[in-house]
Image (cartoon, rainbow, N blue to C red):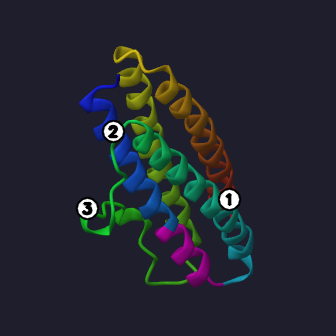
């Protein structure tokens, strides 16, 4: 079976994905300006992907005879993804997304290692799949950051 470390990391990843959905949704609503439209559209697409990640992780936890965290188990951590005071500050949202993606990448790499150590190839495969999505999101937002820094 799997280890406590694997299930703890999965529970963390689940909470992080749910928090990311909330913050991406809020930022996609509150950002203003013509230059914000492309970032808002990207966030809206990513909301569904992040929700799908949470769903897959929750299903894996269920398969491991665990339950995904609920709202009372949740601790918010994504300070950098809070909506900016200035609704036209698109760069701060981009930086927040990059920080969240880096954290997610680190978490999924930890899950891969823990799952490998626990001889849990199903969880390892799940983490590899999600890791690829998170790295793609990071690449996209690095591109946005380059564009905004050149403005």
The residue shown at (40%, 15%) is: 119
Distance between the Cα atoms at labels 1 and 2? 38 Å
Q: Quick one: label 1 or label 2, which is nearer the N terminus?
A: 2
Mark 3: give few (<14), some (14-19) or many (20+) Cα within 10 Å.
few
From the viewer's side, name the closer residue of 66 and 17. Answer: 66
Res 102 visible:
no
Q: Is residue 65 left or right of residue 58?
A: left
Q: Which residues are magenta?
A: 22-32
Question: In the rendered image, which quarter is residue 115 located in?
Answer: top left
As drawn, the label of residue 9 is 2
Secondary structure under tag 2 reads helix
Q: Position of residue 7 (x, y in %)?
A: 32, 37
The residue shown at (45%, 78%) is: 84
Query: Pointer 3: what residue?
Result: 73
Distance between the Cα atoms at labels 1 and 3? 42 Å
Residue 26 magenta-drawn? yes
As drawn, the label of residue 150 is 1
Distance between the Cα atoms at labels 3 and 2? 14 Å
Secondary structure under tag 1 reads helix
């Amino acid at each position: 079976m799997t280890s406590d470390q694997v299930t703890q990391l999965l529970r963390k990843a689940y909470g992080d994905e749910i928090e990311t959905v909330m913050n991406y949704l809020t930022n996609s609503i509150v950002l203003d300006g013509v230059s914000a439209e492309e970032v808002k559209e990207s966030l809206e697409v990513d909301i569904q992907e992040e929700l799908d990640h949470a769903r897959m992780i929750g299903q894996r936890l269920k398969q491991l005879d665990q339950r995904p965290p609920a709202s009372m188990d949740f601790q918010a951590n994504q300070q950098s993804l809070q909506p900016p005071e200035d609704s036209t500050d698109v760069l701060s949202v981009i930086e927040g997304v990059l920080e969240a993606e880096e954290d997610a990448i680190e978490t999924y790499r930890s899950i891969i290692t823990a799952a490998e150590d626990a001889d849990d190839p199903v969880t390892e495969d799940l983490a590899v799949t999600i890791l690829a999505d998170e790295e793609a999101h990071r690449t996209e937002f690095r591109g946005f950051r380059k564009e905004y820094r050149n403005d």
